[in-house]
Image (cartoon, helix red, strand yellow):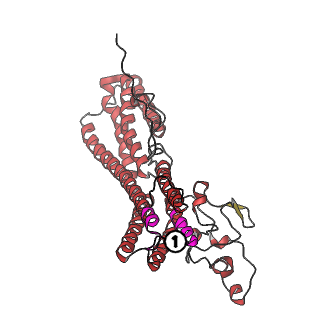
Amino acid sequence: MASLPTQPQRQPTYPLAHAFRKKPRRLPLVLRFAKGAVHEIIALPVLLHSLFTVLIVYLDTYVWDSINIPSTIIPSLSIVVGLMLVFRNSTGYDRFWTGRNCLTTIGTCVRNLARIFLVNSKDKEGRASEAEKRDTEKVVRCLVAVLYAIKHNLRAEFNIPPASLAPPLPKTSTFARSQPASRRPSYVDRTASSSGILGMTTPLLSDSAATLENGEGSIPTKKEDYVSLLPEGLMGYEDQGLGLPLQLTVLVESYIRRGFDRGWFHAPLASQMSVQVNSLVDAYGRMETIRSTPIPVAHLIHQKQVLALFTCVLPFAIVDDYGWWSIPIVAIVAFTLYGIEGIGVQLEDPFGYDKNDIKMDGIIEDTRQEVMVLLEEWRATHEGRAMGGMFD
């Protein structure tokens, strides 16, 4: 007897190595009860409704002659339950799909801007100074850092230390002493013109800093996964309401302006790059809308009540016909309905760490890999050691 052909193993490679699932499924999905399933969410309501059905069957069998109600009420309630669950799941998946498309838009903008910056960051003779090369490399790294900053902001995670907590430098003027702590010019070094007003730095903080002491304990600073991408000593303003993604896009827009002034970008190209930055910010704004706008609580309350009402009425309608078999029947119905509702709950906020959320970590890591390879090849080309001639 001929052996059955084996399924090919998935061997993801770059690009998209992190976004793809690396391991084949060991079990059919119908037998999976752990990773990616919603059984933990629905276990309690299914158990409670099963116990309630046990009570109803016991009362119907041993206490009263019959507590059955007409079964014609079930179709009427099932229509309402079905409509509400369809709305819940369609709305949840629309939020998931919109969030994924917005992440793709952001990644596309980062790719486009990085490509344009690296190709056009030179004068008509193909020359650029060392300072200009460092400026280009810094802004390309900022583009990748935007992805990580967006991810952390959507997950409500701390990014970098706020400027208001920076240790003050020695005071040199009466004007500095009269300013609020978060606004004192002595806190920041404004001499780095390539950073712009929102790229303030302080020499007392570096990329290797892990904590910032403020007298009350240590405060976590930059995330390790993109600490090397940020300009050295960059301070944030999240405590004042300014998100790091927008702060970094200001640095990117400032670079576009400097490139235009240097003659690197003609007006149509500079305008196109500004459109790319605007598209990135717009996509991030739509992701923020998904994150900060939950399903209206009135709908959630009524949906929970309708589900509970239906599964509580169901035992009364079937107890005379099925007897003790009513218990597994109600358990199956509750498992099905609450499972559908649980899927909608997981899809409502798709930016977290759940198995069913968007794989933001892998997608962003793939984009970082692509852009950093481009940057390395660009650097090698300028050093005269490139093999592929990509930027020749």
Please state the horizontal and vertical placement of residue 312, each as a whole percent of the image: 38, 37
Is 136 magenta? The answer is yes
- Mark 1: which amino acid? Ala
For the residue pair 70 and 7, the one nearer the viewer reads as 7
Q: Secondary structure at mark 1?
A: loop
Residues shaded magenta: 114-140
**Could you tell me if residue 55 is visible in this image?**
yes
Q: Quadrant of residue 275?
A: bottom left
Q: Residue 241 location, x and y as percent?
A: 54, 71
Q: Residue at x 37, y 50 (%)?
A: 92
Q: Point out the image quarter for the N terminus.
A: top left
The spot of residue 207 in percent (x, y) is: 65, 62
In the rendered image, the vertical position of residue 263 relative to residue 219, given as above or below: below
Residue at image location 35% in from the left, 33% down from the top = 333
- Answer left or right for 83 relative to 246: left
Q: Find the residue positioned furthest to the bottom.
A: 174
Q: Is residue 184 visible?
A: no
Q: Is residue 67 above or below residue 338?
A: above
Examine the structure image and report whether residue 176 is included in the region drawn in magenta.
Answer: no
- Residue under pointer 1: 128
